Amino acid sequence: MTEPYPRWGTEIEVDQPGSSEHLIVRVAYPPDMRDARACLLLVHGMNEYIGRYAGVADYFAKNFLVAGFDLYAHGLSHPSLHQADLALGEGANTQEIKDAYLAQLPLKNLDLFRKNFDQALQQLVSICNGRGLEGKPVFIVSHSLGSLIVASYLLQHPREQSYIKRIAGVVFLGPA
């Protein structure tokens, strides 16, 4: 790595008791929260990271509260990439991450991804409620593997939780 991770919005670290996993939810707000029509969660695809979605987040943040997160073993949720980013932030010129792909070896199915999505969705709804958007709908925009994760999650969780009931629509871009 030669450059720090691209950041947008406000970083909120999600507490994961008893876990070594690292989950950060990024949130961007409209200039005036009264203009927020809804809450929007961005879900990236395979071997991507939410930092790449800064332009998308900026565009939607004009009218929505927007959140995004890095899936398990992607972006800053990846232990090697997170450590490399910290080193670059402290002044290192480069950081070796040649074995970064090994973090994905434990992935035998989508369970860890769906767990991340569930945590990010709960965090988004909590943030929306805390910003006075309790009655506003939640929309999800997902890409590629992110679409597969969201679709399979929603099929497994048929709107029994209050935060899932808030979902008013999902956009699947290039679904896996």
Image: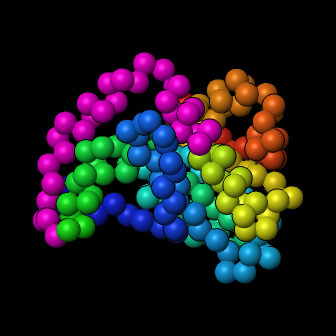
Q: Residue furthest right?
A: 135
Residue at horizontal 57 percent and vertical 32 percent from the top: 114
Q: What is the quadrant of the N terminus in the image?
A: bottom left
Identify the residue at image location x=17%, y=41%: 98
User: Would you say 90 lies left or right of 138 here?
Assistant: left
Q: Is residue 126 magenta?
A: no
Q: Residue at x 64, y 26 (%)?
A: 152
Q: Is residue 39 above or below residue 122?
A: below
Residue, far top: 108
In the rendered image, residue 160, in percent from the top left (x then y), is placed at 81, 31
> Toward the viewer: 129 or 58?
129
Task: Decide whether residue 95 is among the magenta residues.
Answer: yes
Q: Position of residue 35 (x, y in %)?
A: 78, 75
| Picture quadrant of residue 86 | bottom left
Does any portion of residue 3 appear in the rendered image? no
Up-down relation of residue 12 to residue 19 (above or below): below
Q: Position of residue 50 (x, y in %)?
A: 47, 53
